[in-house]
Amino acid sequence: MISNKMVGFVNNNSAIRAMFEEGKRLAKIHGAENVYDFSLGNPNVAAPMKLDAAIKEILDTEETTFVHGYMSNAGYEDVREAIANSLNKRFDTNFGVNNIIMTVGAAGGLNVILKTLLNPGDEVLAFAPYFVEYRAYVGNYDGILIEVAPDTTTFQPNLVEFEKKITAKTKAVIINNPNNPTGVVYSEETIKKLATILEEKAKEFGTEIYLISDEPYRELAYDGVEVPYLTKYYKNTIVGYSFSKSLSLPGERIGYLVIPNEVDDYSQVFAAASIANRILGFVNAPSLMQRAVAKVLDEKTDVEYYNRNRELLYNSLASYGFECIKPQGAFYLFVKSPTADEKIFLEKAKEFNILMVPGSSFACPGYVRLAYCVAYETIERALPAFEKLAIELGLKK
């Protein structure tokens, strides 16, 4: 008999993955070119050619046992130093090798830091809409996820409710910037207000409250929008990063944590996180990918590719009568459902071979998410189907 925790996960498997599987089923029936799958945030842009060249160079010039062997649980020191130097150059920070822990993607990093910080019953706040797996990650360590209701006007964090929900049990706050699923970038003004609230509440309760910044989409920002680097605004900030989106490497599972010296109990937190990396079963981040990404830290994904998709999809859907916030970052549109129950909208969309993800999966019912990290031609082929859907729902005559 499986564990009680896993019974719930099996019965409520991810709607994102369910839609992905549905897309494969429909493709067999109608042909892949006639199915418009916007369910999964799987980058369509190829990884940089310099990355492939770096991998080949490593395999050709370095000793195999070294390339594929164990290292410190925190990762190769030269890789961590290279990442620290890159961050310092970009954000005017002052990190060193002992502020970086290499992780199995951002998801692995979040689990490492939550394992490090949480006692059973500790509370972690997250702003809805939030990435579907946060609740599971917090529950892995018997923490309690506390949702902050969304501000559906701007989708900036609802700071009024946030302040009210912080208690003596609050151990951490997770933010995702740029945000999945809305594509909104939290402004510097918002971050400063959030930091002030955390400082005041930590002082009021005599506790440490850690701000965990989940940043896999940091490099994907449009129209010159700046994404604030949070360690500069609140001392107890820990950053989780992934190369999944910036270098189009989702399947390689490579990222890192930044734990600044200013963090309360820094030495213990860093040591515990390094051990958590091991005892969670990761042991260490993938060795070859550590060495490879260190050689291409200045490479970036083709943001203009995603921007072209963003403009086409957003402008077209808006012209058909659909309502959504124009995203400033990431590669998602968060569209208001024309029906009270977004699942009815999703089922109607499937009649036109359009696959999207329900907003309820992100703790924000009444909306759907579209991932536009697909081929431009896929969006072009999908637009007539979206237009027919809009007519069917009475949004367009």
Image (cartoon, rainbow, N blue to C red):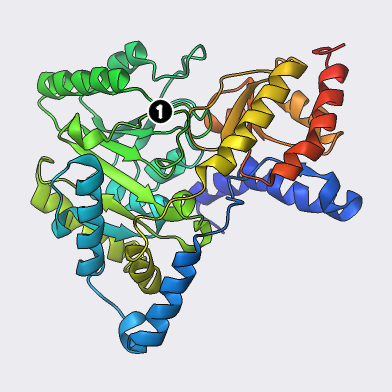
Q: How dense is the environment of label 1, judged by Cα within 10 Å: few (below 14), some, or many (20 and up)?
A: few
Q: Quadrant of residue 205?
A: top left
Q: Do we see residue 118 in this rendering?
A: no
Residue 217 against residue 319 in the figure, above or below: below
Q: In the figure, is residue 221 to the left or right of 332? A: left
Q: In the figure, is residue 170 to the left or right of 68? A: left
Which residue type carries mark 1? Val
Residue 334: horizontal and vertical position, in percent? 59, 26
Residue 392: horizontal and vertical position, in percent? 87, 19
Residue 250: horizontal and vertical position, in percent? 51, 56
Q: Quadrant of residue 212?
A: top left
Residue 388 against residue 44 in the figure, above or below: above
Q: Residue at x 68, y 40 (%)?
A: 38
Q: Nearer the viewer, residue 250 or 161?
A: 250
Question: Of all residues shown, which one is farthest toward the right?
Answer: 29
Q: Residue at x 55, y 23 (%)?
A: 364
Q: In the figure, is residue 82 to the left or right of 364? A: left
**Residue placed under numbered mark 1 in the picture:** 225
Q: Residue at x 10, y 46 (%)?
A: 261
